[in-house]
Image (tube, rainbow, N blue to C red):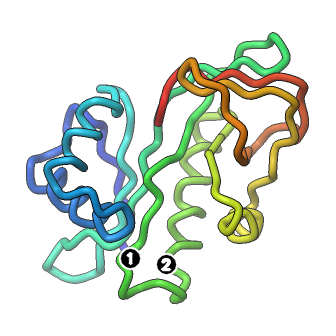
Amino acid sequence: MIWKTVKNTDLSVVEELQIAELKNQYWPYGIASQIRWMKDNIQKNDVHLMGEEIDSSAILKAYITLSDLNIVVDGKSNSSIGIGGVCVDAALQHTGVGKQLMEAANRYIETQRKMGVLLCKNNLIGFYKKCGWKQLSFQTAVVAGFKYKYNIMSFNSDCSCSEITIDRNF
């Protein structure tokens, strides 16, 4: 797998379409809806981490959005990177590509010297823990102005706080 990062402002129409098609395997809202969500929620400085097979086809097989976030943890502001839209081509599930994708995301977060954060479903906690992420313990969480009661995972940070506020959806 070849890993590349592309700033959102540099994303080509072909890459945007490939991302929408890959994401639609897991969130079947249609290609137009996927593209609209990206336009509404991914900001110009956010980064797309893409994994392509090592051949001449350059077909997208794995993907993560790396979003610049401002997170306030117990009153202290942190410049952070949120990862979202994590997906691997369904034909490659259980082959180790997902772990490779997360390792590439972890390297990116480390080079930026920031805290990593992701919002997580219960059934994925074990996977993310295997990839070096920790489940964040909190009393109150707010994401994009709304109370959030599900799981938050962190990378390069402490694992407990009283209150966490994440400035936007990602």
Amino acid beneath label 1: Met
Q: Nearer the viewer, residue 124 or 94?
A: 124
Single out the mark in the foreground, 2 or 1. 2
Residue at 57% across, 62% down: 102
Q: Is residue 107 above or below residue 140?
A: below
The disc placed on residue 1 is 1
Amino acid beneath label 2: Val
Residue at 66% across, 26% down: 147
Q: Is residue 4 left or right of residue 78?
A: left
Pointer 2 or 1: first along the chain? 1
The disc placed on residue 97 is 2
Classify mark 2: helix, strand or loop.
helix
Question: Which quadrant of the structure image shows residue 145?
Answer: top right
Question: Which quadrant of the structure image shows residue 80?
Answer: top right
Graded by Cα atoms within 10 Å as few (under 14), some (14 to 19) or many (20 or more), the crowding at tag 2 reads: some
Q: Is residue 14 above or below residue 22?
A: above
Graded by Cα atoms within 10 Å as few (under 14), some (14 to 19) or many (20 or more), the crowding at tag 1 reads: some
Q: Nearer the viewer, residue 164 or 9?
A: 164
Answer whether labels 2 and 1 touch (C-beta < 8 Å). Answer: yes
Which x, y percent locates residue 96?
A: 55, 83
Q: How many numbered markers are drawn?
A: 2
Q: Quadrant of the N terminus?
A: bottom left
- C-alpha gap between disc 2 and disc 1: 8 Å
Which x, y percent locates residue 170?
A: 47, 36
The disc placed on residue 32 is none
Q: Is residue 112 above or below residue 73?
A: below
Residue at 67% across, 24% down: 142
Q: Is residue 47 above or below residue 5?
A: above
Classify mark 1: helix, strand or loop.
loop
Question: Residue at the left extreme?
Answer: 13
Q: Is residue 153 left or right of residue 14?
A: right
